[in-house]
Amino acid sequence: MADVHLHEKRAERLKKLIQASQVLARVESLETLLPQLLTLAQDVTYTEGSSILLYDPAADRLRFTLARNECAGLAENLLGQNIELRLGEGIAGHVAQTREPVIVNDVSRDARFSRGTDAKTGFVTRNLMCAPIVHQDELLGVAQVLNAKERDAFDPPDLELLESFAGLAAVALIRSRLLDLRLAQERIQAQLDAAARIQASFWPAMPDLAPHAEVWARTEPAVMVGGDFYDCIPLADGSVVVAVGDVSGKGLPAALVGAALWARLRTLATTVDAPGEFLAELNRQMGAVLSGGMFATMLLGRVWPATGRVLLACAGHNAPLLCRRDACLELAVPGGLPVGLEEGTAYPSTELRLEPGDHLLFYTDGITEARAPSREFFGEERLFAILSEPARSREGASGSDKSLRGPRLVQTVKDWRAGASANDDVSVLEVHLK
């Protein structure tokens, strides 16, 4: 008869273990998970008390994270003590260190048992079981149950149940961690989406330069936000300041620096005449912002659409391109170091004159360094080939884009990547003299 009762009791406990696995599979937050774990641990092992000690790898300590006890106030008292254990300290520390579960049916005879916790809480421990909570060799913590109920000692089947419970607890803790990570990633993604919308709203509308010229610009970040920027600022004398910049790095840090540069660019445009002086002043003002190894390459121009006069200055950026009829060449523009690298850098200004029909293009190295799925670079040879194509090759373009070369270049680079992720931001600014 006793054997029948024992089998029934173990069958009931196995049923509770199955129920525990179902409950833990539904728990999503750690705050909800830990109390459930303790309740299930005591239900499965039929004990007076239980506790979970989570492992803090940074401190290399076990911490009592949650406790449950049938005696009112004892669990709260235990947690209020902020008790920590070193690996190897006490029975829980020993289990964490060895990764082996134990039964101690008489703690008074076990030298590993530390009476400090009982002394601090008033609980009297008679016997206990302790099992490590481990996931793929990573120590997560220790589960322990105290004082077997309606029996004098724990037995090996009891320990097997606790080990099974500890395995479920490990999966549940990892699942909770992954859910927290997913939520954090979703919050970051939402913030990046908002940042991308805000940055897109900053891109300036290109002014109407009719009847003498037209200007077009486009930027496409490699990630949600990018460090490339452009601008075209009309001045009172009929000229326009045109600029393309490329902040080192990608993502949000580069975007924030790019926004700061763009704001200074707008402020200085109406106070500095020559592009070289403009860059020198920008370099001076941005020294503090561009600390910590960040810098920005820039190409700056001042264009008089009515006459075709152009002044150019370069800060470590790709040289501008001049497309005339069916040929494209790189303009030699002496320059200085990128903005933010060295105080007192000089930036000479270079003058040239555009003829009707000419295209002046500024671009960032995301164009030439774009990679196909085969990892081959787009390169300068393709760049010049696309920009040198005769106008009839651009008949598929719509509206004013038929006379422009930048839109076709950006689309060709996108086709070249063939769906592969961009490895750098892409920007193009084009001035077409009519």
Image (tube, rainbow, N blue to C red):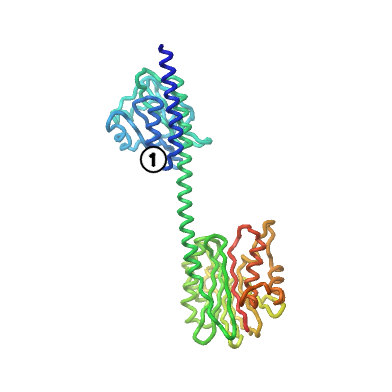
Residue 321: where, in percent of width, then height?
65, 75
Residue 75: where, in percent of width, then height?
31, 33
* Residue at the extreme top of the image, as rendered: 1
| 263 relative to 13, above or below | below
In this rendering, would 93 be left or right of 124? right
Name the residue type under label 1: Thr
In this rendering, would 107 be left or right of 409? left
Which of the two residues, 198 or 311, is positioned nearer the viewer here? 198
Residue 35: where, in percent of width, then height?
37, 36
- Residue 294 makes an appearance in the image: yes
Which of the two residues, 57 or 185, is positioned nearer the viewer here? 185
Dot 1: few (<14), some (14–19), or many (≥20) neighbours within 10 Å?
few
Query: In percent of the image, x 35 and y 19: which residue is there?
Result: 150
- Residue 95 makes an appearance in the image: no
Q: Work out which quarter of the rendered image holds the C terminus and state it.
A: bottom right
Which of the two residues, 216 or 244, is positioned nearer the viewer here? 216
Residue 217 found in image quarter: bottom right
Which of the two residues, 32 or 106, is positioned nearer the viewer here? 32
| 404 relative to 94, above or below | below
Number of labels in the image equals 1
Question: What residue would you read off at disc 1?
Answer: 32
Residue 5 found in image quarter: top left
Judging from the image, what secondary structure is the residue with disc 1 in?
helix
Residue 23 found in image quarter: top left
Query: In percent of the image, x 47 and y 24: which residue is there?
Result: 160
Q: Work out which quarter of the rendered image holds the N terminus and state it.
A: top left
In this rendering, would 189 be left or right of 361? left
Query: In percent of the image, x 38 and y 41: which residue is there?
Result: 31
Residue 15: where, in percent of width, then height?
44, 26
Query: In percent of the image, x 66 and y 83: which residue is there?
Result: 357
| 392 relative to 167, above or below | below
